[in-house]
Image (cartoon, grey):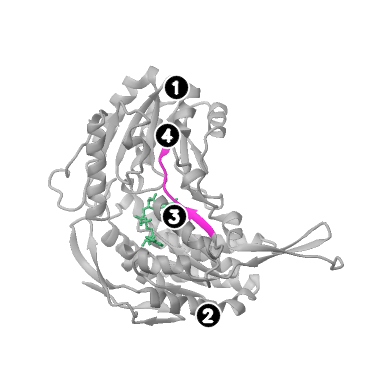
Amino acid sequence: MHIIDKVYIDGAFVTPHGTDWFDLHNPATARVIGRVRLADAEDARVAIAAAKVAFPAFSRTSKIERIALLRRMHDALKARRDDLLEAIIEEYGAPTARVAFMADHPANVLLDAACVLEQYDFVRRIGTAEVVMEPLGVAGLITPWNSNAGFICGKLAAAIAAGCTAVIKPSEMSAMQTQIVTEALHDAGLPNGVFNIVTGRGEVVGAEISSHPDVAKISFTGSTAVGKAILRAGAETMKRVTLELGGKSPSVILDDADFTQAIPLAVGVGFGNSGQACIAGTRILVPRSRLAEFEALAKAAVENVRVGDPRDPTTAVGPMVSQKQWDRVQRYICIGIEEGATLLAGGPGKPDGLAGWFVRPTLFTDVRNDMTIAREEIFGPVLSIIAYADEAEAIAIANDTVYGLQAYVMSTDEDRARRVASRIVAGRVLINTYAHEPMAPFGGFKQSGIGREYGTFGLEAFLEPKSLLGLHAA
Ligand code: NAD
């Protein structure tokens, strides 16, 4: 039983003022494996005050000092890689295929931020002005459960690189990962108050951070509904916001695609992170002229997807993170059937013999883009095939969504794929690949969010330009 009863404020592990406890589960067994004592609004206020006190000195540190700090943070995270990997499996149920990336990513993003900083010029000349990029102030960083350690480190890396101090509100469901990350960052020896971590409920601690006048910036990853609440809460004090929200990404299969490659890729991008991914390609757009061929091959591919024990190296899809998430996915599968979609593989209920929060990898066809399963984010291993007549219709369907986070195009003709990609409204379009580029901007158009993370764009999201005029050129 893991008992986590401390939060991290002003450089120390302290007992929170909050007295509520939250159960942690192993989603592969649905059993309780730990308890976490939650911070409350008072803890959030004390953490914000510590970050505020730390800001003046930290904002004046040199680029070289912050690069050294990010490298130390990277080394400290890397040293805890195996502990993190265990926690991600136990607390989140990520299968072997995914968990290595999730355990490496938190350390890697810190190093990436150090590299960005090395190249970045905080001062530039524009006409007669000297323009200085200045850190915004105290940053509130709020993360979801589907890649908690990675999001904490990615957001903190950008904040630190910019010279901001931070108050982090991780998902309460990921307290074991948070504990390991906090211990590692403590070992890295940051000045007191530069980062503070208060695990608590979103509507309590998250809401306090989002509305507090001493927080200048919010970087949030999570659902679109909560993103809107944060935007509203921050409006009163004009907080700068980066919102990384939901998606309903299209996988556009062009009629020249090689199905031996396109189908495994479409299934892979749909079921990545057990389907609990904002970037999942959940709407598979298939040319009507090749629909029957695609359906037969995709059905076989989905039926072959191994769901089960996350520790089994052949497992591709692990459990849903919680009973609530399992119920949500089941509800959508039932809605799909009720609205007239045809079930090709999977369906309601648990796979045989599995007690945890497992879902049967599910594939629908005969889906219209106005059906609920094509419009709303399901966040589980449920994919929809939508047929289209020609390229123009494929693009229209791809863009007929309130989201615009990511899209996939599969074709043997790169020029054609590029042309289609240029007309899709999404922050990232991946052509015949599922590869991540850590230096390229990441984020969404439309209701998938505001702003970008990673690389120079991610750094500048924590900076504000100041123009100095009247100075003589150096
Ligand atoms: P969520 O929005 O419920 O919660 C995210 C975080 O916000 C949690 O820490 C939660 O405690 C906190 N929160 C909840 N209510 C709050 C409030 N009123 N004020 C401030 N904070 C509050 O999301 P989730 O269920 O944890 O994660 C799944 C969602 O995250 C999906 O919609 C998914 O698409 C999205 N997501 C987006 C990205 C991206 O980069 N675009 C990445 C991963 C997940």
Q: Farthest residue to the right: give it.
A: 472
The reply to whether the C-beta atoms of the residues labelled 1 and 3 are less than 8 Å apart is no
> How many residues crowd around disc 2 within 10 Å: few (fewer than 14), some, or many (20 or more)?
some
N-term-proximal mark, 4 vs 3: 3
* Disc 3 C-beta below 8 A from ligand 1: yes
Q: For marks 2 and 3, give the one nearer the viewer.
A: 3
Kind of residue at badge 3: Gly
Which label number is shown at residue 255? 1
Examine the rendered structure and indicate whether residue 108 appears above or below residue 280: below
Kind of residue at badge 1: Asp
Residue indicated by mark 3: 227
Residue indicated by mark 2: 191
Q: CA distance from mark 1 to mark 3?
A: 37 Å
- Left or right of 448? Residue 24 is left
**Magenta span of residues:** 241-251
Residue indicated by mark 4: 251
The residue sitting at 34% across, 30% down in the picture is: 385
The residue sitting at 17% across, 45% down in the picture is: 350
Q: Secondary structure at mark 1?
A: loop
